[in-house]
Image (cartoon, rainbow, N blue to C red):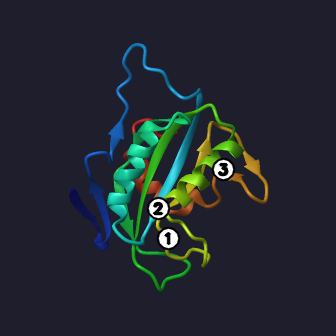
Amino acid sequence: MIKKRLGDDRHTLITTEHYPYHLQVSGGKKTAGSHKALIGVGGNIGDTPRRFEHLYWLLKRSRMVTLVETAPIYRNPPFGYLDQADFYNTLILLQTSLTPRQLLHYLLRVERHFGRKRKIKDGPRTLDLDIIFYDDIGIDTERLKIPHPEWMHRNSVLIPLKYMKGRR
């Protein structure tokens, strides 16, 4: 694990074995679909970088998605509810044949697999998975908003995004 401070000690860029990662496509490699989805990943309970490694392997083995790219991990202070540990955030680019709603349900199952419990808005969590973009479509329903609201104002998205090759 390599850490690079971005300003003070609470703003740090972390690289690990699989963050960042970029899929090397070889002939005959099948992918899980033609839709691209950029997923925001966050957490601040327990050993979050280790949990991100476990997430990497879960997604790599999934038949529902193809993991295309990951960004470095960004450690940053919480916002909203401030009485909690710093967050670790990254981005994952997936290919999938799932619709946006199906992808949302899949990601919620993955969060539960990693022990996610929703108690306090913007509160501590083991794993948070948000759809930032899905192709170039827009959705605005009570349960699903794409692009993710306020993504363009969050360093937890903007900083990892600038390190991605496939960007969006």
Q: Which residue is mark 1?
A: 125
Q: Which residue is mark 2?
A: 42
Is 59 positioned to the left or the right of 15 in the image? right
Residue sitting at x 36%, y 35%: 22
Give the mark nearer the N terminus: 1 vs 3: 3
Q: Which mark is residue 61?
A: none
Give the mark nearer the N terminus: 1 vs 2: 2
The picture quadrant where one finds residue 21 is: top left
Q: Tell me whether circle 1 and circle 2 mark residues in contact (CB < 8 Å).
A: yes
Identify the secondary structure beneath mark 2: strand
Residue sitting at x 43%, y 19%: 29
Residue 160 x, y percent position in the rendering: 41, 52
Three-letter code, disc 3: His
Find the distance from the CA under tag 3 to the CA under tag 2.
17 Å
Residue 48 x, y percent position in the rendering: 37, 64
Find the distance from the CA under tag 1 to the CA under tag 3.
18 Å
Give the camera-side residue of 48 and 133: 48
Residue 155 visible (yes or no): no
Identify the secondary structure beneath mark 3: helix
Q: Which residue is mark 3?
A: 105
Which residue is most to the right?
141
Q: Residues within 10 Å of mark 2 (few under 14, many from 20)?
A: many
Find the distance from the CA under tag 1 to the CA under tag 2.
8 Å
Question: Which one is in front in this view, the residue at disc 3 or the one at disc 2?
Answer: 3
Q: Is residue 39 above or below residue 76?
A: above
Residue sitting at x 58%, y 51%: 107
Which residue is most to the top?
27
Give the mark nearer the N terminus: 3 vs 2: 2
